Image: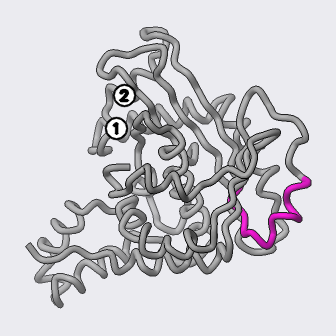
Amino acid sequence: MNELGLDPNQALAWFPHEFEAPYTLVRVSAANANGWKTALCDAVRRCYLSDSMLRTRAQALEAELQGTFESRQATIIKSKLPEPSATMAGDFGEILIYAYQAAKALPRATIGPKKWKLKETRTKPAPYSDVVQFILPTWPVPSDQDEVLCAEVKMKATDNGKSPITDAIDGCAKDRTSRLSNTLEWLKDRAINENLGTVQLAHLNRFINAIDHPEAIKRFRAVAVICENLLNAELPSAPAQASSDYELVVVAVPNLHAVYNAVFEAAKGSTLPPT
């Protein structure tokens, strides 16, 4: 969360739980959702492009891109962020749940890869598990209190005929059987060749080489982020009983389509002042 410039305590207020059984229902207020345009724009841009990289590239490309320092940054940012599409919607849902999981882990701190930086193309989602984060309370000493948080996230901002709750549950099953393991191995390969920010190779090896360390806790979530006016039509697909294998979280956001488009539009202008 620190890499994104977000305060987990502030984010915690965004996600009030209406109830927690047999699943967790979160209702985001209209005031908080409308405020994300300002509160999340820098964080969203940093999910794709760090401050240091943005500044470095804008300086390095002064001759090629010409224009002002601010306009060069805007061109670079635009080249990284997705255009309005299902990919943008999916990315927003994942980033939102990245913040949610970090906030709900308080007072413990989470770290996690910003998988959106690792995309091969901005027109497609990042591969493997949607959101992966780690809680390592005694690091660098591994303990049986270490946790890996893994969330499968589905978005529904418009009435498109899809079932985000069912789809999230199905995807979460894939995380539990093999996809999380594959994700950690993929992240390890990336960490060998590039800087993943707060996530280090040793963190990944702690969970990959599980038999060499105390048994860690794995927490899986199936998350459906749904526009509030579509919520009542979707809730009947939620299981009547909680599962011991995963937690189902349903997040209702007013005017979701307009909100995430406004956040990404603001993120395009998330430029840095000249030094």
Q: How is the image coloured?
A: one colour
Q: Which residues are magenta?
A: 224-236
In the rendered view, does 15 fall on the left or right side of 241? left
- Label 2: few (<14), some (14–19) or many (≥20) C-alpha neighbours in 10 Å: some
- Residue 160 is situated, as x and y percent measured from the top left of the image, at 80, 72
Going by the numbered disc 1, the residue's amino acid type is Val
Residue plotted at (27% across, 44% down): 195
Q: Which residue is mark 2?
A: 203
Residue plotted at (42% across, 79% down): 266
Q: Is 95 inside the magenta-drawn segment?
A: no
The part of the image, by quadrant, that contains residue 141 is top left
- Residue 170 is situated, as x and y percent measured from the top left of the image, at 77, 43
Is there CB contact under 8 Å for labels 2 and 1?
yes
Q: Is 226 inside the magenta-drawn segment?
A: yes
Vertical position of residue 76 compared to residue 111: above or below = below
The part of the image, by quadrant, that contains residue 15 is bottom right
The part of the image, by quadrant, that contains residue 252 is bottom right
Going by the numbered disc 2, the residue's amino acid type is His
Mark 2–mark 1 distance (CA, rounded to whole Å) = 6 Å
Instruction: Give me the disc on residue 199.
Output: 1
Residue plotted at (63% across, 53% down): 16
In the rendered view, does 265 fall on the left or right side of 270? right
